[in-house]
Amino acid sequence: MIYRCENGESTDRLAEVIRRGSAPDGGLYYISDIPDVSDLLYGDSVVLQSGHGGYNDFVVKILERMLPDEAPGISWGELIDSAYDFAPSLHALESEYVLELFHGPSCAFKDFGARFLARYLEADCRRRDEKLVILTATSGDTGSAVGQAFAGSDAIDVVILFPRGRISHLQEKQLTTIGGNVHAIEVDGSFDDCQRMVKRIFADQSLSSGISLSSANSINLGRLIPQMLYYLYAAARLSADGCDAPVFCVPSGNFGNLTAGVMGYMAGMRVSGFIAATNRNDVVPEYLQSGHFQPRPSVETISNAMDVGSPSNFPRLTRLYSDDYARVRSHIAGYAVSDEHTRETMRTYAERHGYLACPHTAVGLAASAHHRNANLAPSEATFVTLGTAHPAKFPDIVEQATQETPEAPERLSRVLRLPSQADTMDADVGALATWLRERFGR
Ligand SMILES: *Cc1c(COP(=O)(O)O)cnc(C)c1O
């Protein structure tokens, strides 16, 4: 695969791309020349075992084909086996599927990207005998996935900024109870303030001189590549069961997840299209309607991990279609779902199917139902909505909508009993620079 910058430079070194996160010009790395792996997805010779062992075998074959020389000093098999002791799971409802991606340590799909990235960077640091600091801002779910993924690493420290009072109690507990090499900083400001502080540190080298910094945010291709793999897996499994070319419906915020799905399509996965499902932060559905992309400040909703007003992966998404609006539009449908409709969907699925969905997944289920009812896809198409988080991550919202209490997995209830540790900070980049130099400067 080739990774290109906006300014035309390119590299084929994945380790460099992952270590840097963003391109040398500060922008995105764009991915091109994605190898076709369709023979590994379809046909009689494809063997798919269930459970995480089966998932791992499948994705290792894909990685060995796509990125034969890019494993960081260990084999893809070793890396993947140390990353994943959990797997995606296709949950069949009456006439559709939920691809549940929340069976990992932080109970959200971001575990797939974060664990891969963590194992990759760790192996790369070991090979180069280097230390690294990951600096990231979170509006909720990213921080816990990234924190969990790097917990206990001796080569890598993680610094996570979160906005005071703007994330759920459980999310805060997930971030602040890891400790050790994972440092949580509570910022007196908004998520946008946190993100601005992080961006300034990356943009101005003098602020972090001598510290080797990397980001783990969703523009890092080290998160998108592993996310592509679960789409391929789901498509292969469904095809083996006689359901070819599904429609994937993706609850979206920063649009990393949907971009990963389209990367899968470029790699030869057969699909009948994608659905971009958003909450009221609807700049992408609006673009799909009008052809105009107009980022704006985000608004708060009950699916808060999708409260993004300026989705950073959007240019990467359209680039995969050569920035051809007609092509994007013919392949991706967009729907914005209100909080009210989201709650109603949670209620309907609980009553009709006994299925509890988190508010993000419910946005997807609502968009998928809308699309089906409007007869916009081939009538025989199978619909797969990505289940992005466990309902027990959002117990209050789920309970309010459905009158049912989602049962929390032990890994979630455990964090509530652990003591929190976080430093506090004003929304000031100078304060962050000082904090970083005091801890990691040489
Ligand atoms: C991050 C997140 C999303 C949005 O994913 P993007 O890749 O940013 O579009 C959706 N649901 C949950 C639960 C998330 O944590």
Image: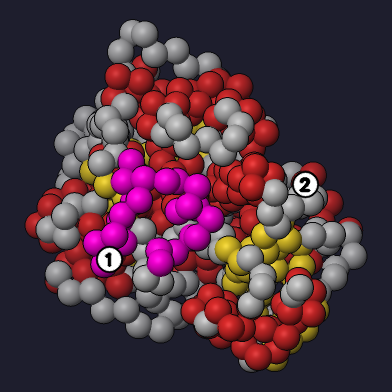
Quadrant position of the C terminus in the picture: bottom right
| Residue 278 appears anywhere in the view | no
Give the x, y percent position of residue 1.
Answer: 33, 41
* Residue drawn at (35%, 22%) of the image: 41
Q: Which image quadrant is residue 261 in? A: top left
Q: Determine whether, in the image, residue 383 is placed left or right of residue 102.
A: left
Q: Residue tagged by mark 1?
A: 6
Snapshot colouring:
secondary structure
Does the magenta segment cover residue 23? yes
* Residue drawn at (41%, 23%) of the image: 237
Instruction: Check the image and report above or below for 257 versus 135.
Output: above
Q: Residue tagged by mark 2?
A: 411
Instruction: Check the image and report above or below for 50 versus 202.
Output: above
Query: Of 234 and 211, which appears nearest the observer?
Result: 211
Does the magenta segment cover residue 19? yes
Residues shaded magenta: 1-24
Give the x, y percent position of residue 54.
Answer: 55, 20
Query: Of 36 and 288, which appears nearest the observer?
Result: 36
Q: Determine whether, in the image, residue 237 is placed left or right of residue 322.
A: right
Query: Of 374 and 440, which appears nearest the observer?
Result: 440
* Residue drawn at (36%, 45%) of the image: 12
Q: Earlier in the sequence, mark 1 or mark 2?
A: 1
